Image (spheres, grey):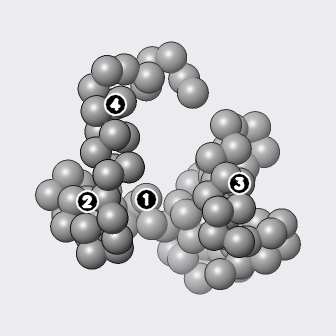
Amino acid sequence: MNSKTRTEETDHLFDAILKLKDRDECYRFFSDVCTIKELMAMSQRFEVALMLNQGMTYLDIAEKTGASTATISRVNRSLTYGEDGYKLAFSRLGIKEGEGL
């Protein structure tokens, strides 16, 4: 992880997230922590990642999600050169390469 984001404060946030027990608790926590726009942006990026994992084209992804090609490119760069966070999440959800939810 980027040394600029690995801070004590970020550790506290992630520790709190790891203590959440179910989807309802996540909704409650993230509704308090994030604006609606921030939460929708994170959700959109995850959907873009799922679609890229399925091999969908940028054009199809943009049409289905409303994401800009810049956002799609940024997510693709994370999938290709990032810390494998998306791939870890996909694995934990039982999603293999080429698959979606």
Taking depth in this image into account, of 41 and 33 the one nearest to the observer is: 33
In the figure, 99 relative to 31: above or below?
A: below
Q: Earlier in the sequence, mark 1 or mark 3?
A: 1
Q: Earlier in the sequence, mark 3 or mark 4?
A: 4
For label 2, the residue is 30
**Which residue is located at x 71 percent, y 61 percent?**
91
Disc 3 is placed on an element classified as helix
Q: Is residue 68 visible?
A: no
Q: CA distance from mark 1 to mark 3?
A: 16 Å
Residue flagged by tag 3: what amino acid is it? Lys
Please tell me whether mark 1 or mark 4 is closer to you in this view: 4
Q: CA distance from mark 2 to mark 1?
A: 11 Å
Disc 1 is placed on an element classified as helix
Please tell me whether mark 1 or mark 3 is closer to you in this view: 3
> Residue at the top extreme?
3
For label 1, the residue is 42
Q: CA distance from mark 3 to mark 2?
A: 22 Å
For label 4, the residue is 10
Q: CA distance from mark 3 to mark 4?
A: 21 Å
**Which residue is located at x 83 percent, y 66 percent?**
97
Please tell me whether mark 2 or mark 1 is closer to you in this view: 2
**Which residue is located at x 65 percent, y 81 percent?**
101
**10 Å crowding of disc 4: few (<14), some (14-19), many (20+):** few
Q: Where on the picture, by quarter, is residue 42?
A: bottom left
- In the rendered structure, the answer to whether residue 71 lies left or right of residue 34 reads right
Residue flagged by tag 2: what amino acid is it? Phe
For label 3, the residue is 87
